[in-house]
Amino acid sequence: MVFVDSSVIELTDAQKKILAELLNIHSNRSDGPVKGREIAAAIDRNPGTIRTQMQSLKSLQLVKGIPGPRGGYEPTTKAYELVDFDRSGEFTPVPLSRNGDAIDGVTVTEFDLVNLHHPDSREAEVHVQGSVRGLHEGDSLIIGPTPTAHLVVEGVVDGIDTAMNVCAITVEDMHFEQSNT
């Protein structure tokens, strides 16, 4: 269950995956709707399945359909709120590297330590803009440095939620880098 504006919206795993992919594709283009076949190709589903799921997402006011030959689907503001996806451009993306190599087109938008009340807990959730499909359990990640504090977090991927673009990591090191300014 996901809470939005004091109401509860329950999405199936398929709906979450389709909505997340729509948001990813739409956020990486300058304008225009996303074709159902683009989403289908990206998540390896039948375009008919996408059309069917889009009808239910439209009824939940998460997606709007754009008719015509240049039509497709666009996410609503409610869709962005639902998946806590920042499209405002007001945040500064934080770089993400896997096994020592920067991941193009993927940036960290949120980093949450899972249990602050237990100092020995080293679990964290990493929310990204872009796709986590290229990540695998056991990959070493480096997050940062963050723009203001220059925090760098190093860890190992424990789990991945491709529908919500989140990965769980075990934090191995957190440190601050010296600013070059």
Image (spheres, rainbow, N blue to C red):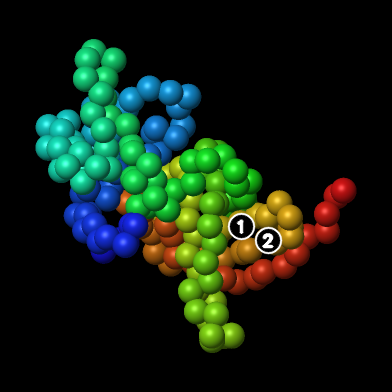
* Residue lying farthest to the top in this orientation: 69
Task: Give the labeled residue for mark 1.
Answer: 142
Q: Is residue 41 visible?
A: no
- Residue 13: give x, y in percent of width and height: 22, 54
9 lies above or below 118: above
Compared across the picture, whether 128 is left or right of 96 comes to left
Instruction: Residue at 23% x, 13% y: name it.
Output: 69
x and y percentages locating residue 24 in the rendered image = 40, 39
Q: Say few, some or many: other residues with alpha carbon within 10 Å of mark 1 (under 14 / 14 to 19 / 20 or more).
A: many
Q: Who's the residue at 24% across and 57% down the image?
A: 9
Closer to viewer: mark 2 or mark 1? 2
Q: Is residue 34 above or below residue 2?
A: above
Residue 152 percent across, percent down from the top left: 68, 61
Q: Quick check: marks 2 and 1 in contact, CB under 8 Å? A: yes
Q: Which residue is painted at 39% across and 50% down in the image?
A: 81
Amino acid type shown at disc 2: Val
Question: How many numbered circles are shown?
Answer: 2
Query: Would you name the residue on which mark 2 appears?
Result: 152
